[in-house]
Structures are given as C-alpha cells and as structure tokens.
Image (spheres, rainbow, N blue to C red):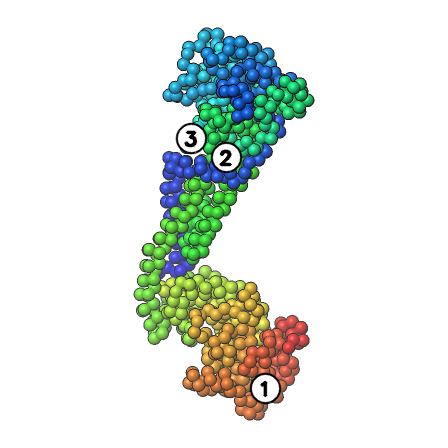
Amino acid sequence: MALTESQERRIQTVRGAVIAVACWLAIAVLHAVGAFSTFDLKLLDWRFRLRGERPAMDQIALVGVDDATVRAYGAWPLPRDAYALLITALAEGGARAIGVDLQFPDDANQLAASNRLLAHVAGSHSNVVSSIWFQAHGAEPRDPARRSPQTELALSRHGVPAGDLDLASAESISLPYDDLVLKSSSLGHISVAVDPDGAIRRLPLVVRHGDYAYPALVLNLMGQSRGEVRIQGVRAARGGLAFRWPRGHELFVPTDDAGTTGIDFAGDRGSFRNSYSMVEVLRWYRAGDRERIRGAFSGRLVLVGLTSRGEVSEDVGTTPFSTATPLLYVHANALDNLIRGRFLTRISDPLHVAFLAGIAVLLATLSMTLPLPVAAMLTAGTMVALAGLGVALLALWGVDAPLVPALVLAPLVYSATASYRQLFQQSRSRQREADIREGLGVQQRFLPEALVGRKLSRYVIDAKIGAGGMGVVYRGHDPRLGREVAVKVLQGGSLADETMRRRFRREAIALSKFSHRYAAGIYDFDTQDGADFIVMEYVPGQSVEELLRRGPIPEPEAIRIALEITEALGEAHACGIIHRDIKPSNVVLAAKGHAKLLDFGVAQLAFPSEGPPTQGRTLTRAGELIGTLAYMAPEVLAGKRADARSDLYAVGALLFEMTTGSRPFADDQPLELMYIIQNQPPPRPCVLTGRLTAEIETVILRALEKLPDDRYDSAAAMFAALRSLEVRGADPVDDDGSSAMPDEASEMK
C-alpha cells in the first residue's frame, strides 16, 4: 500500500534523525582529535573581550617595576637592596602577605651585600613568598649550575610529597641564589601553562618535581591570607585538587587533564585599581609618608613584579586581553580567582557531546519538516543563540563551552538535510506524484468508482456520493474510531505544488477546530498516491437540491433552514472562516429535519492581523475562482476578496431559490451570467410566486444587493431579520424553543 503524506513526513523525520546522527558523529570525532581546539581558544578570547574587563577583588594590590622605576635606577635589573627596602616598606604598611613575582638568579653583577640584605629581609618576614620557576620537559634549564645539598634540602621543605597524584610535572627548576632559598620562609612557583597557540589561559597551582609537589606563589599567598605559611598536603578530589594547611584550612581547585587550572580573567591592567609604581612607593617610604602606604597596602595581598613596557623579557605573555601581558597580571588574575572561589571551568565532554546531539536532532527535524527558507532562518538563529549562550555562560558562571563544534554542526546539518530534500526526496516525490496524477486524475474524473474499496490513509472508501468542481466525494468509514466519514478527493492539480499544499493543510487544521451543530466538521487532511483528500463528517439525509426538484419549499420551512445556516455562518465568521460555496447541494437536512452546512473544505480563512475581520486570504492562486458561479457575489466575480457579506449574498440566493423554485439569475452561459449578476437587479420573488410575504422578499432582496455595504453587515443581523419572520411560519429552530444566536443580534443592523 502506498504511503500517505503524513506517513511520509514521519519517515522523513526519521531520516532527518539519521542525517543528524551522521553529522554529529563527524563533528564529535573532529572535536575529540582536537581539530577545533585552536579556533575554540580564539573564540574563548573573543568572549572574554566581549564580556569586557571587570574589577578585581579589592584585597589585591600590585606594585610594578614599571618604566619610571627602571629610569629612576638607571637600568634593568635593579639593585636588590631596592627590593629589600620595598619589602620593608610593605611590611611596615601592614600588608597581609607579599609575593615577589620576580626571579633573582645568581648574578655576578649584583653586590654580595645587596644579596645578603634581600635574603635577610625576606627571611625576617614570614608573610613574604619568594618565587621559583619550573621548565617543561625538554626545555633548557635557566639554572644549569649544580645546587648544594643544603639548597636541595631547603627546597624540599617548601614542597609536599606528590605520591601518585596526576599533576603537572617539570624536569628542571630555576631557583634564586642560594642565600635567598635558604632563608626564605615561603617559596612558590610562578610558572604558567602555554596553550597550543602560544597564549596563557591556564596555571598549574601545583607542579611535580621529583618526589615533591610545589605550590604556586599565588596559592601560598592565599594560605598567607589565612595565617598559613606553607601547605601541608594535597589530595585528589572529584574534578580537581584539594589543598590542606596545618591549621585545618582546605581549598578545592578544579583542574583539567593536564593538572592545570583555567583562569577566569578579570582583565588586564585596567582591572586592578590598587596598582602602584615601585619608585612611587619607595618615595612615600623615604619621605616618611607611612599613612599613605598603610592606606594603599594594609590588609591586602601584595604582588610585586615587572610591568615595564620597555623591557624585553620572558615575564610577558599573550592573554585574552593583550598580546603582551606582564606575568604579574596573569598571577594577579589567578589570585583573584582563588579569593573569589571561581575559576574558568570547561563543560564536561559527555555533556558537551550530548548537547551537540540534541542540537543536531532538533535542527535536522526542523530542516526536514519546515520549508527550507524557514529552516535556514532557524539555523542562523540557532547559531546566534549558541554564541549568546557561550558569552552568558562565561560571563555569569565562568564556564567555557566550546562553540566551534556547535557553530559548525548547525549549518552542516542544515546543508545535509537540504541537499537530501532537494537532490533526492523532492525530485523523486515530484516525479512520483506527476506519474500517479496523470493516471489517478483521469480515474477520478471519468471513472471515480475506481477508488471504491480502496483505502486512503486509514479510511476505507465505500461508495461515491457526489462530485463537484473541486473533486469527488465518497462515503467511507474510519476503522480506528468506528464512524462513517465523507472523503472529498480533490481534483489532480488542485494543489499542484507544495506551497499550495502546505497552505491548504494549515487552513484545514484551523477549520478542524471549528465546530457547530449546523455545520459538518472537518476531521483530517492528507495526501496519498498524489491525491489530496479531506476527511469530513458524514451527514446522511436529503439535500436542499433534492428537495427543490419537487418544487419550491414552503416559506416557514425555508426560513427555518436559512436561520440554521446563518447561525452556523455567524459562528464561522467569528472564527475568521468564510465558506465561499453556499448552494443547495451543500445544505443537507439531517436528523429531525435540521440543516447541516457542508463543504467547508474550500473555505477561506480571515486573518485579523492583516485587516478587518471580514477580510480573508484565498486558497487559490491569482485569477482563479472558488465556488459556484450562480451563488457568487458580484464583488467576488469582480476579483475582490470574499468576506462574510459574500456568504450572506449566497444565503440570499439560496433563500430566493428555496422560496421560488428558481435561481435569481438563471442564465447558463458563464460570461453572460457573470455580467447579469454584476449589473442587473434580481427579479422580485413575489412576482415569480404569489405565496410569499412582503417581509421575506425584503430580506431576500437586501441580501442580494450588489454592494456589500448595502447588505446585512453580519450573519447575526440577517439571523435577527429572519427570526422576526419565523413567528409567521415554522416552529422555533431548537428543540427547546430557544435560539442559539445571542439576544444582541436583534439590535444589530
């Protein structure tokens, strides 16, 4: 059995999911092998810059060896007694901890007395942290000289046993001169991790060297802020490392597979408000301005480092905010993260891959079911939304969600599904429908009984019950719900392209939501074997057309039928639905003689957002007419849009025919009939039959006015006019003697 369009759409959705999975697997594999890593890093920097710099924590103060300081001392490097004096000034100013983010290797050009003074001052203050530097495996050591056993022993006191922890490791280490190592209360490394593109975005807060793990300078500063000189131990924790100090303090820090921690950068120089020049601080100290020094540094964690733009050194690196950021600011950003307890974390790979799978399936489903231009706009919107989501995750929670895989996946899924639809499915579907329509259309027109006994979707065709300009109507039954239905098979070519079919399907869905006791409902719309069909309520009974074969209908009965039709139309018009094909064959007298208005399948939907409620969109293309010529209003024949008053014209023509037994305009030639309808007044019904009252003639002639504004302006108004005549004829419409139309109808025009 051939598939219906709804079944094909379900299969199409499944095929879209298969395409989505294929695209997702390709992207997931490329992501796993690192094909997008460089681009993801650049997008991470872009998101940092888009977020902008934010103020760092106020507890941090920076003292920079800037260009002014270098000029004041004549050359770089500065004499080491200047640093001794600076440490003294900061300690007396009440600094909580002092981190010297500078390296002091053995240097024959430095005075021995200056070296001894710096070592003595650093060792005299337990809150001073001196720096060491690690080199990666294969790097040339900066300090190739052999160290004394005393220096090795002193170094080991600043580390903790590494055990079997998975840590960042280093092959060699650069230490300060021996006297500073031996006397320093605390040592911390200032090494950084460099990404494949050469930029710095991560920091190893602990480095394995030999059997020991050595903390970073900023980690020791964090301990100093809690009154702890050195860490006591480190252990693995879920997603990172937990550091422990002797007094019981613990700190959890997230780490990646390389043992490094991402830095949630506050910014570059502009983010650190408490930044001072070294020469400026020393001038305050020499001038005895202790109050200013205390105001600048009391209770703060102070980092001292090189910030000179004129010095070419290894103490600069590329960061998201600059291509030449002094390492002092890198370490200051890491210290800011430690104080805040917020680091740059990356979304887990399983969650990221699952998220990509969801995007792929969603976009594939949309691309396979929606019009391609709409799917393209949704794909573009998805990419914009993903970029916005990435910025929001970074700005609000410090989460790095790699964007490149998702930004590549979205257009890839759309391109794959669009290619599938255009190159394969649509071409084969058009050819199949053209072949089937060529034969099935002939069957429907000349041999409509060929469908009897067949199934369209789940509906079994039992018998042909009528035919019209739009197609053939069959009686059938729905085995699933156990009810009889009417199936209208549209003529081949009625919905010849996919655009027309989508529009008709939307409007059929809207019509199916309309329900009234005097209107036959619409249940379904589908396509099979190239045949478009509508499934409607089956209404057994005799049509008005069959009644008229025996002659005019008595006035009271005609009024009752017209009342029930206008009641149904009033409800339909309120929902924005225009019938457009009211005629005797579309009115059936069903159970208890009540009228049922059939065939809303060619209706027109009104859209209040595009105009007044009485205006609507046609289901046909330009130049085509829908309906039966003898019952069309003059304005419709003139090419204007049908509205509610066009339906009332048709009711007037129907009422004319029911009461007189003939149509108001009886010419059989289409062109002549169109001319007469638009230009000649209808004959008076009382002239054709002497049995009519003047009141009903007034109602009929008003409904048949040439200008829409001269007719009843609504179905409710015409209902009220007919209701006033009903007392002369038949019993009330409802079994309980009441009218379904609102009482206000009598007050309407």
Label 1 vs 3, first from the N-terminus: 3
Q: Quadrant of residue 33?
A: top left
- For marks 1 and 3, give the CA distance: 93 Å
Number of numbered markers: 3
- Secondary structure of the residue carrying numbered label 3: loop
Locate residue 460, reporting x and y percent. 41, 65
User: Callout 2 environment at 10 Å: few (<14), some (14 to 19), or many (20+)?
Assistant: some
Q: Identify residue type, mark 3.
A: Gly
Give the label, 1 or 2, closer to the camera: 2
Q: Which is more toward the observer, 33 or 528? A: 33
Which numbered disc covers residue 321? 2
Q: Which is more toward the observer, 567 or 87? A: 87
Q: Which residue is mark 3?
A: 198
- For marks 3 and 2, give the CA distance: 14 Å
Q: Identify residue type, mark 2.
A: Phe
Label 1 vs 2, first from the N-terminus: 2
Asked if residue 474 shows in the view, the reply is no
Which numbered disc covers residue 14? none
Query: On the rendered image, what quadrant is the N terminus found in?
Result: bottom left
Q: Are marks 3 and 2 in contact (CB under 8 Å)?
A: no
Locate residue 496, reporting x and y percent. 38, 67
Q: Which is more toward the observer, 568 or 60? A: 60
Which numbered disc covers residue 697? 1
Rendered position, 715 above or below 478: below
Looking at the image, residue 522 sits to the left or right of residue 563; the answer is: left
Label 3 vs 2, first from the N-terminus: 3
Give the label, 1 or 3, closer to the camera: 3
Asked if residue 149 shows in the view, the reply is yes
Q: Identify residue type, mark 1.
A: Glu
- Secondary structure of the residue carrying numbered label 2: loop
Rendered position, 299 above or below 355: above
Considering every residue shown, the one lying at the far right of the view is: 291
